[in-house]
Image (cartoon, helix red, strand yellow):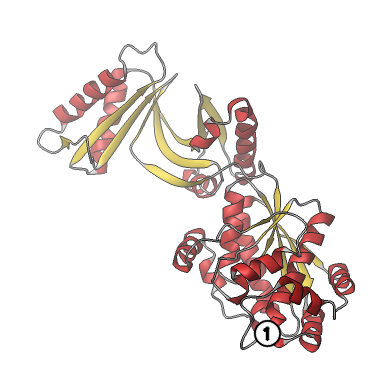
Amino acid sequence: MRKLLMVKYAPEIFLKGLNKNKFEKKLRDNIKSVLNGVQYKFVTDQGRWFIESPDLDETIERVRKVFGISELCVVTQVENDLDKINEEALRQVEESGAATFKVFGNRANKSFYLNSMEVNRTVGGYVLKNLEGKISVDIHKPECKLHIDIRDYTYVYSKTIKAVAGMPYGTNGKTLLMLSGGIDSPVAGYMMARRGVELSCVYYHSHPYTSERAKDKVKELARILKGYTGKITLYIVPFTDIQMDIMSKCREDELTIIMRRFMMSIACKVAKKYDIHSVATGESIGQVASQTMEGLVVSNDASDRPVFRPLISMDKGDIMDIARSIGTYDTSILPYEDCCTIFVPKHPKTKPVLEQIKKSQELLDTERLEDEAIDAMEIVEI
């Protein structure tokens, strides 16, 4: 008898057909990566994955953040012996303190002499007999869900831990996240990474108008995301000269949208330089002046590759809920302003016209400003 952590990966991986092995290998490699420094042993049994470790709590905390894993279960492994299965089942139901229970038998090992339904009846009957008057069966909403998984060994468990699910990180290309210090962009990065997209980040820093604390705040957000991705490269682009030039030569109401075009264009140039396939943002339609449909069309025109906006139709409340659940919210609300918030016009244009904005931008030496910013860029490995 021993305690193990059963790893259940996302059902979506089962649908990959001939490519399933590739996704499984990547997921397993990602698990090994997050367990670096932890004593553990990887165990398999008829398609099931298990982790044996003297520190299950630490193992759970790390592995539950691995994209592609839907559920973790702390299981007791016993021999395929009905008496031992009954004893462990009784112990777990009794320790649960539940008033109702249900047995979920799964006989993957067809050499075991009871089928799944017979396991349910036999084990359930044994529990009822030994806890007579203390517990009853409820097949609809049981307080204790007792699982009996029969393979080369039998695995008995009644507690499950929800993991992040999604696709194995690193299986679906790369994106460069435009990471600000706000609530939205870290959530957008998390959602892209959850679909298996490898994440790098670009942050625009306007020294001395934005403080070092603002930069440290963004680095901390990247560190939190790193807990899910394993590693992140953060590109910090100096943006002061660009903003000051826009303010001195362009109309005030066009400041925000022209600034967004510079950000988009620089992100694409950085992405091209480092072989990153796409750009991702935390924009949500209609949330602020630059995120109207017209504004998105104008900023998209400055891109040369796909721009992903995973939050585009989400309400702010829903975005905040995700931020809290992934651990970025408390950092995002720290009162250190980024370059998007310090130079905001009183009446920004909400329905910009592309040709008019491009004409206004002709007043600027766009190519030189962008290239100088990229040349002075700071690269931080998180």
| Residue at the spot of label 1 | 253
Which percent across, then down, holds residue 56?
Answer: 48, 43
Residue at left offset 22%, top offset 44%: 97
Residue at left offset 60%, top offset 67%: 293
Say which element carries label 1.
Answer: helix
Left or right: 170 in relation to 183: right
Quarter-wise, where is residue 188 in the image? Answer: bottom right
Which percent across, then down, holds residue 24?
Answer: 60, 32
Which sits in the foreground, 159 or 199? Answer: 199
Left or right: 57 in relation to 148: right
Residue 261 appears in the rendering:
yes
Which of the image's four quarters has the N terminus? top left
Which percent across, then down, holds residue 94?
Answer: 23, 38
Which percent across, then down, holds residue 270?
Answer: 80, 60
Which sits in the foreground, 273 or 151? Answer: 273
Residue at left offset 52%, top offset 62%: 327
